[in-house]
Every structure is written in C-alpha cells, then in structure tokens.
Amino acid sequence: MGWGISIGFHVVGLMLWVGGLICVSRMLIPFAKGESASAGVVAALNRSMHAFIYPGFLITLLSGLYQLFERGASFYMKQGWFHTKLTLVVVLVVLSVMVAGQISKLLRGAALNRGTVVAIHAATASVVVIVVFLTTVGRLAVQG
C-alpha cells in the first residue's frame, strides 16, 4: 500500500470513527434530559456504533500502524506532536467505550446522566479539534 493511500484510509477511518462518535454522543443528549428512548432509536444508535465507530477505529488503527512501520517508529517517536496525538487517541478510545456504555444503559432501560453525556460529547469534539490542529501543525513543521 502506498503512503498516500494509507493517509487516505487514515482520514476516512478517522471521519467514520470520530464523526460517528460525535453524532451518536449528540443523539444521546435528549435521552439524558428525560425523553423516552424507543427501542428502534436505541437499536439505531447501537447499529451506528457497529457500522461507523468500530470500523472507523479499526481502519484508523491499521492505517496508522502501517504509517508508523513504513516510515519507521523512530521518526515519529522524535516528534512531540505525535506523543500528544497518541495520548489524545487514547482519550478518544476511552470516550468511545463511554458512549458504548451509555447506549448499553439505554438498552437496559436505565436513565442517563445529563452531565456525563454532555461531557462525553464536548470532550469528543474538543479532542478532535486538538488532534487535527496538532497533526496539521506537526506535519507542516516536519515538512517545512
């Protein structure tokens, strides 16, 4: 696989993973405000996890590992922005697990905590902005 193709897969995977995460976390907010969740809506949220978030994570992970080994781990390990980006990726993984937990609560008929759901959504959006910024600035600094 070529470098450009790998970057393309990485971006598409990230869009699926994080885009799905932002959408699903946003769709959870009304249920945390006390609105009742129909079985169909909860099932659709659960399907979104399996159709977008999990595959997007897998594509992002595999293409990222390819890039890491293709260019050499030592190249990336010298980049400060890369360490911050990896830390934030771990945060995104935790947020993904938290969203799955909220959907699981809905499937069981349990109430959602509004503060938790809003915090998950806000943290996800914030992390995405920071990761995109760091990656863009970091790559431009390496190329320039």
Image (tube, helix red, strand yellow):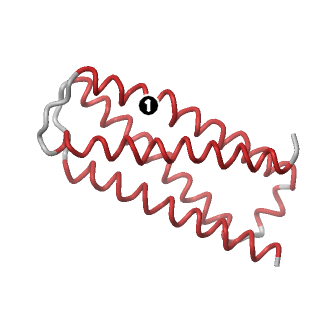
- Image quadrant holding the N terminus, namely top right
23 relative to 129 in the view: left or right? left
Tell me: residue 12, above or below residue 142.
above
State the image coordinates of residue 80 (x, y, percent, origin top left): 68, 72
Secondary-structure class at tag 1: helix
Foreground of the two, 39 or 138: 39
- Image quadrant holding the C terminus, namely bottom right
Write down the residue under mark 1: 48
State the image coordinates of residue 127 (x, y, percent, origin top left): 48, 60
Amino acid at pointer 1: Ser
130 relative to 2 in the view: left or right? left
| Residue ID at (30%, 41%) | 27
State the image coordinates of residue 34 (x, y, percent, origin top left): 11, 40
| Residue ID at (75%, 45%) | 65
Tell me: residue 18, above or below residue 83.
above
59 relative to 49 in the view: left or right? right
2 relative to 96 in the view: left or right? right
Foreground of the two, 143 or 87: 143
Residue 40's image quarter? Answer: top left
State the image coordinates of residue 92 (x, y, percent, origin top left): 49, 50
